[in-house]
Image (spheres, grey):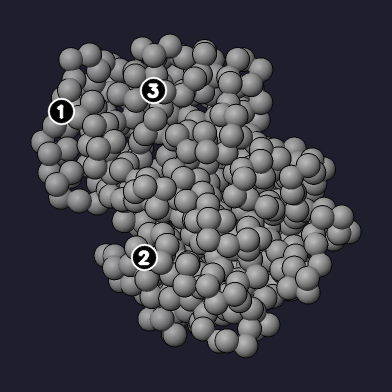
Amino acid sequence: MNSDRKVVLLFNPATWRGVGDATAPWGLMALATYLHPDFEVLLLDHRFDAHWPQETRRLLSTGRVVAAAATAMTGLQIRSSLSFLRWVKRHSDVPTFFGGMHASMLPVQTVGEPSIDFVVVGEGETVFNAAIRRLADGKPLEGWGGSDAIVWKGKSDYRFAVENDLDALPFPPVELFPLERYITATRYGRMLSVLTSRGCPHGCHFCIHSNPKLPRKWRAVDAHRALQWMDHLHQKYRVDHFHIQDDNFFVNTHRVQALVDELLETPRKYTFTIGGAHIQHLRRFDEAFFLTLKKVGCTRLLIGAESGSQAILDRIGKHQTMEDVRVVNRHLLASGIRPIYSFVCGIPDETDEDLKASVSLMKELRQENREVDVGTIKPLIFYPGTSFYQWALDHGYKPPMSLEGWTHVSWDHYLELPYPWLSQERKKFLLDLYYTSLLWNPEYHWVNSPLFTWPARALMPLTDWRMRHLEFRGSLLPSLLRLVQHKALSRPVDTPELKG
């Protein structure tokens, strides 16, 4: 650590001990964009840094830490980040920040946590930078004119900070961080996640982008600049495959075509998966385009099909039809790009006939394209900030009254979620549907283990019958899978408070 500079300490949370997630924390690393090189920006990652409490105390003891910041999504990540922030406050009076989508949706409740001094609402590159510099100069944030996207105790008015011009934003200084730990071995070689755009112009009711406080604006890095960034990461870190984790990659047809044209003109030695695609945008392209997309390196597309029922698609505000999905599936079959779909259940006003329609569509997609990954049918969680969250509040949902209470709002605790419109029997049915749909997909992208694949293949005839008839009575496997997840995967990583 450079002894001449003040330190900004960042913390990335863990979720489950048994989940091998190594996704790069680009949101946190981006906070260093404007802070470096005036400040030393250090990142502790709970998934990798087992001795973070000791390292945190060591850094605090130097007297050079000007602020500590953490992020979290709704659910188990909150527990991890709270352990860090409480540890900081136990051993210092360093100002603490909390950010991320959960905090941005519920900033007033979040800042009510005693270990949190400030909440950054929205994207933090510019806002957090200005706040840190002010604190380093010994000036308070309270009452500061540049703090309209920062909430502190007693403040309830705020705006959502957005970086409008991503091309004007420097790429994160990755050389400051141990990027190698976020590169994983896959069938495509060394894989790293990246982002080339932010936001989504749609407002699907289960999605955070349906929140009226968020500008429904999609922003992207220019195609050439995005490829330059990937080229740099490929050359410096020997990345063979990129997982592009944009919420919605195909919004701008011209940008996509420009990226494909450059890759045709100057082929790269890496391939890529596109992790966010809307059927409505994919329908703009013909079969020849997908053949070309495959040629320039695209191996997989993750697509939100959501439902096989048009009534449910309309209910969630998903502007697509079954025929749209079928056409895209055929194009991808012809191209050799593997589609990976996702489906959802537990939508308000949903019937068993709607669920059977989803099962029917999944079966049809699989029969037409043997390479397809139909995903699973996962129960909906009414996340704060979404349109459906407001619907839930209007229909009797009593959300947690503190930040810590949101720790258990997750699929692992689905049966305990107080959704008054769903009986316990119905919630168990939806969980049985989810776990049976998992068994129904032996090649599931997110499992990828022979210990799962071989038994799932052997059970396929019975699982297929159960899915088609939505008949899960007498089946022990869904309960067994739920128990395995709860006991083996969902056991949180140890935190100082829980150790006593």
| Left/right of residue 168 with respect to residue 392 in the rendered view | right
Marks 2 and 1 in Cβ contact (< 8 Å): no
Q: Residue at x 17, y 23 (%)?
A: 476
Marks 2 and 1, Cα distance to the nearest angstrom? 47 Å
Amino acid type, label 1: Pro
Asked if residue 91 is positioned above or below residue 104 in the image, the reply reads: below
Which corner quadrant of the image does residue 218 belong to? Answer: bottom right
Whether residue 323 is visible to the viewer of this picture, yes or no, is no
In the rendered image, which residue does mark 3 sit on? Answer: 415
Whether residue 234 is visible to the viewer of this picture, yes or no, is yes
Marks 1 and 3 in Cβ contact (< 8 Å): no
Q: Secondary structure at mark 1?
A: helix
In the rendered image, which residue does mark 2 sit on? Answer: 51
First-in-chain label (2 vs 1): 2
First-in-chain label (3 vs 2): 2
The percent coordinates of residue 187 (x first, y second) are 27, 65
The percent coordinates of residue 153 (x first, y second) are 74, 45
The disc label shown at residue 380, or none = none
Which corner quadrant of the image does residue 26 belong to? Answer: bottom right
Q: Secondary structure at mark 2?
A: loop
In the rendered image, which residue does mark 1 sit on? Answer: 461
Asked if residue 427 is positioned above or below residue 221 in the image, the reply reads: above
Marks 3 and 2, Cα distance to the nearest angstrom? 34 Å
| Left/right of residue 428 with respect to residue 291 in the rendered view | left
The percent coordinates of residue 189 (x first, y second) are 30, 71
Amino acid type, label 2: His
